[in-house]
Image: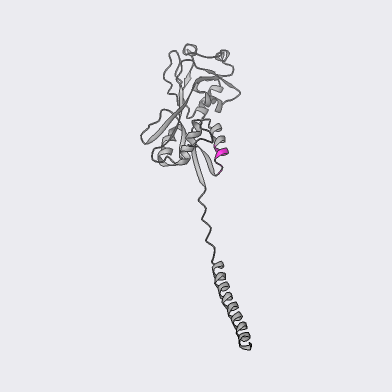
Amino acid sequence: MSGKAGASPANTAGAKKSGGAKKSGGSKKAGTPPRPAPVSAEPRVLRLGAVPGATPGKWIRIWRQRFTDVTLELVPLSVAEQRDALMAGDVDAAIVRLPIEKDDLHVIALYDEIPVVVVSADSALSAGDELRPVDLAGEVLIVPADDVLEVGPIEGTLSPRFDPPATTEDAIATVAAGVGIVIVPMSLARLHHRKDVVYRPFVDGPIAPVGFAWHADRQTPDVDAFIGIIRGRTANSSRG
């Protein structure tokens, strides 16, 4: 009876020791260092070029509402540099004046602007609601060096006796001084509006087409998403 009683405590002790070893092994597993957190991606930026007079405000507002993780940076471009900026990758896409050389570019036509005649506020031409070529007879027609309409000679108008102004803004300032008239897209007349000039729609004048362009080899998902906004796709569209 006493031998059996002595064996029982020993067996119990062995059982406790064995159980402790199992716990020790479990603690090593629990102490395994955690996996490093994934490195976050670099913030994305969509660089959108825009020529003077372009009005992408609505599209930009929609972009900022839908794509809060991608910064949209608006980059002003002159018409003379619009293609070079796209080719060099200075911008991801751009709102451009058409026509533009399409080699290596994809281009979407957006809208056509009507031309207007900018005249001094006290000019007799300001009395009309719109103007036609015949109304401009005897006026000095100023064509700035950055002209985007390619305004050709208009029968009855006079050529200025001074060098063409370098910019549309300079041309409008000359008109404000009471010298001549200038024909520009309506958006540029609004952009450079002054109290001492007015503008009137020019019937039968050259239109000013505007487009959206991007490099054919750099059509990123972000560019695709902006195209979707331009084309009126909703936020729930599978294409963005």
Q: Nearer the viewer, residue 109 or 132?
A: 109
Q: Is residue 64 magenta?
A: yes
Q: Nearer the viewer, residue 81 or 234?
A: 234
Q: Looking at the image, how many numbered discs can be counted on the residues? A: 0
Above or below: residue 14 compared with residue 110: below
- For the point 52% across and 17% down, which residue is it? 201
In the displayed orientation, state which residue is furthest to the left. Answer: 103
Q: Image check: 159 left or right of 32?
A: left
Give the x, y percent position of residue 190: 56, 25
**Observer able to see residue 162:** no
Q: Magenta part of the protein: which range?
A: 63-68
Above or below: residue 61 compared with residue 199: below
Image quadrant containing the N terminus: bottom right
**Observer able to see residue 16:** yes
* Quadrant of res 97: top left
Give the x, y percent position of residue 184: 49, 23
- For the point 48% across and 40% down, which residue is it? 222
Give the x, y percent position of residue 189: 54, 24
Q: Is residue 228 magenta?
A: no
* Quadrant of res 177: top right
Give the x, y percent position of residue 202: 50, 17
